[in-house]
Image (tube, rainbow, N blue to C red):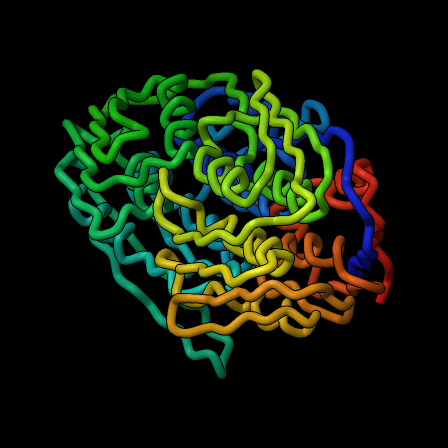
Amino acid sequence: MEKIVVENSGKLNGRVRVSGAKNSTLPIIAASLLGTEDIILEEVPRLKDVEIICEVLRALGATVEDIDEHTIRINSSNLKTYETKFDLMNKMRASFLVMGPLLGRIGKAKCALPGGCTIGARPIDLHLKGFSALGVEYTEHYGDLESGEDSYILAHTEKLVGDKVYLDFPSVGATENIMMAAVLAKGRTIIENAAMEPEIVDLSNFLRKLGANIKGAGTNTIIIDGVEKLHGARHQIIPDRIEAGTFMVAAAITGGDVVVENVISDHLRPVISKLEEAGCEITEEEDNIHVKGPEELKCINIKTLPYPGFPTDMQAQFMAMMTQCDKTNIVMETVFENRFMHADEFNKMGADIKIKDRSAMVTGVSKLQGTDVRATDLRCGAALILAGLVAEGETHIHDIYHIERGYEDVIKKFSGLGAKIKRVEE
């Protein structure tokens, strides 16, 4: 096993380029099952989660090959099965996104119940509600844990037929899965209370290049008129707004001066606003964002919400920054009920964080102290790197596979800004 060791690094300075968005790449690769010709995807990040979703497609009969470091070719013209492998599906929640495309292409899907970070309940009931509205019948099989029997959902339909679907919560995954099924359904599908994240828009743009008829992505109502078949296309993945936000907070927490390259500023409005409120100087430069951290951070309050609100995926990183403010900050988490596990890790480093229900009270401390901590999930791991940058001594971060699920070349990128960070064998 390996761990990441971070030392107090002073002010970070320099330029760092953001990779393609993980949360766009995964559904777009899944959606490639819908096309019957070559699909070329550019700006694909080299991440463990991307490797897994590519293996899921290969197991279904698609070919996935590298063209260069960040470009892949996918051909799904000869799918050989509708059953996904349990050992792959269990590693990552986003792998469940192949169900919509399989129902669209084959009319059948057998998918293991998904795994992923333990940040709270992320039920698939909204996915299934949408599929049912389109004419899908399904059965749920829950295996015996003691015997090692798999849990899965078996779904089938004679023909997908468009209908109106209202989502009780604007779930990103459910919106994506229903979109992907509906593009080959007969007639019109209307998704109400749909998620509005930039990754939804990116998926819609990709599907439209394949020949789908979609309107309204980026609003809370998406209208899809089904087509007979989809073809191939070339598509460039949008930049990762969460990776960009993480490096912006790195500049803020260290009082540094960092230019974050390859970003779409409009995707980062809540993050920019809160960093400015904390005292940062931020300049937008075409596809770059220049962040200068303050000498002293001001206290702020955040409340996570679905897009365009403050992203839950940035909550842990901001909590790390809040430990360096001189007063008390409040964090309210409304998206996931178990997304404060990083607070315990920060407290091991000397932070003063108190949790009550879905709120956290973060009182700034003069210094964090490096110690052994654990990346309980992807964003927790990134936040612990940020905390380690300003802590005294060495911070040893364990379970770093979580970090590598979502951050490409994380050691190289932080090192390029002057961070004292390395990966070592435990």
Which residue corresponds to the image point at 31% horizontal and 40% vertical from the top-left? 195
Report the number of discs.
0
Q: Quadrant of residue 164?
A: top left
Tell me if 197 is positioned left or right of 424 in this view.
left
Residue extending farthest to the bottom is: 146
* Quadrant assignment for the N terminus: bottom right
Q: Residue at x 82, y 49 (%)?
A: 9
Image x and y of residue 64, in percent: 60, 32
Please tell me whether residue 120 is drawn above or below residue 132 in the rendered image: below
Could you say where residue 153 lies in the image, as x and y percent from the top left? 34, 59
Q: Residue at x 72, y 47 (%)?
A: 254
The residue closer to the viewer here, 280 or 230, is: 280
Q: Is residue 87 above or below residue 133?
A: below
Q: Quadrant of the C terminus?
A: bottom right
Task: Name the one closer to the observer, 344 or 330.
Answer: 330
Q: Give the residue drawn at x 58%, y 24%.
A: 283
Which quadrant holds residue 215? top left
The residue nearer to you, when weighing 279 against 81, is 279
234 vs 165, left or right, is right
Say whether residue 118 is visible: yes
Would you say residue 379 is visible in this rendering?
no
Q: Position of residue 140 (x, y in %)?
A: 30, 64
